[in-house]
Amino acid sequence: MNADALISFLSIGGTLIGTFAGIVVSNKLTIYRIDQLEKKVEKHNNLVERTYKLEGRMTEAEHDLRDMKGGGTDAK
């Protein structure tokens, strides 16, 4: 085996190792970012759910207050 062939094989090997290492690092970063986005979405969904419950409680409180004032549902 001559020196040119050896250099060619070493160059190809180095290129492949570098490429695969870059792919692995990129994949790890993508997975990390997806995990962070999932956490943010979960927080947002919890906020929306809590807001929906609070709106329901507020509507009930408004109805109760209206009933206490003796207005019923037709009075404003």
Image (cartoon, rainbow, N blue to C red):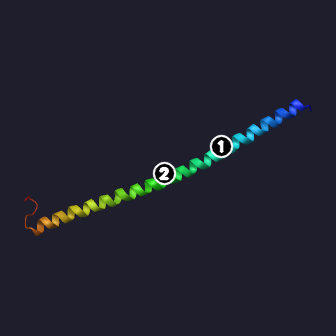
Which residue carries the number 1 mark?
A: 23
The x, y position of residue 22, in whole percent, is 67, 43
Labels 2 and 1 touching (C-beta < 8 A): no
Task: Name the mark on residue 66.
Answer: none
Q: Secondary structure at mark 2?
A: helix
Circle 2 crowding by C-alpha within 10 Å: few under 14, some 14–19, many from 20: few
Q: Is residue 68 above or below residue 7?
A: below
Residue 35 screen position, x and y as percent: 53, 53
Quadrant of res 18: top right
The span from disc 2 to disc 1 (Cα, nearest Å) is 21 Å
Q: Which residue does the image show at 78% across and 39% down from the upper left?
A: 13
The three-letter code of the residue at mark 1 reads Ile
Quick one: which residue is furthest to the bottom in this view? 68
Residue closer to the observer: 61 or 29: 29
Instruction: Using residue 57 as the reference point, say whether residue 22 is left or right of it.
Output: right
Q: Which image quarter: residue 14?
A: top right
Location of the C terminus by quadrant is bottom left
Tell me: residue 32, above or below residue 18.
below
Helix, strand, or loop for circle 1? Answer: helix
- What residue is drawn where x is 57% and y is 50%? 31
Mark toward the start of the polypeptide (2 vs 1):
1
Residue drawn at (12%, 67%) of the image? 67
10 is higher (above) or lower (below) than 62 = above
The amino acid marked with disc number 2 is Leu
Where the N terminus falls, by quadrant? top right
Q: Relative to 15, is 44 above or below?
A: below
Q: Quadrant of residue 58?
A: bottom left
Give coordinates of residue 12: x percent, y percent: 78, 35
Q: Residue at x 9, y 67 (%)?
A: 69
The residue at which mark 2 appears reads as: 37
Q: Is residue 6 left or right of residue 76?
A: right
